[in-house]
Image: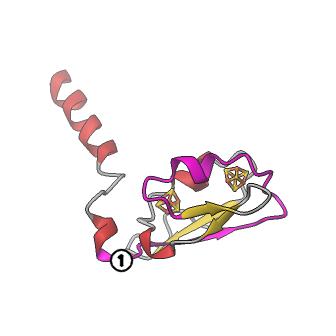
Amino acid sequence: MEQKRTATAEPSEAEEIPSQKKRKGPQGVVTVFPIWCKGCGLCIEFCPTKVFEADDEGRPIVAHPEQCTGCGWCEWHCPDFAISVRRIDGKEGDDGV
Ligand code: SF4
Ligand code: SF4
């Protein structure tokens, strides 16, 4: 039984990064609050579908919103809480903001 738990946990996490969904159109709406953003670049660098581009000050611009999968990585990892992601894939309300 312990082996099943381990095997089940890893695929579940992998499903949170749906590489195939990006081809179906946007599944998240991303909002960046530039007043709070310090331009660390984490979101720009690690967004799996490269939604962001950097402006002249290194702050993210939502340059490719159609590529957002709604995975929430940028929102969870932004050290300044400067990003909000609203899912539009039927799971809306999960983030609560
Ligand atoms: S939620 Fe954030 S990290 Fe995930 S695809 Fe959209 S912009 Fe990129
Ligand atoms: S992770 Fe947050 S603080 Fe860093 S560049 Fe992105 S929005 Fe700005």
Q: Could you tell whether 20 is left or right of 74 in the image?
A: left
Residue situated in front as seen by the camera: 8 or 57: 57
Secondary structure of the residue carrying tag 1 is loop
User: Where residue 25 sits: x, y (%)?
Assistant: 35, 77
Q: Which residue is mark 1?
A: 25
Vertical side of 86 occupied by 80: above or below: above
Badge 1 density bin: few <14, some 14–19, many ≥20, Cα 10 Å: few
In the image, residue 11 lies at what x, y percent? 24, 41
Name the residue rendered at 50%, 70% in the picture: 93
Q: Pick whichever, 48 or 83, lies toward us.
A: 48
Would you say 14 lies left or right of 45 here? left
Residue 79 image-quadrant placement: top right
User: Along the line of sight, which residue is nearer the eye, 86 or 49?
Assistant: 49
Q: Position of residue 80 (x, y in %)?
A: 76, 50
- Colour treatment of the image: secondary structure
Q: Going by the image, does 12 lie left or right of 31?
A: left
Q: Residue at x 50, y 53 (%)?
A: 47
Mainly helix, strand or loop, the magenta region?
loop
Q: Horizontally, is 52 left or right of 59 in the view?
A: left
Span colored in magenta: 24-51
Amino acid found under the numbered disc labelled 1: Gly
Residue 58, placed above or below residue 40: below
Look at 43% across and 69% down and name the residue there.
67
Task: Quadrant for residue 68, please give it.
Answer: bottom left
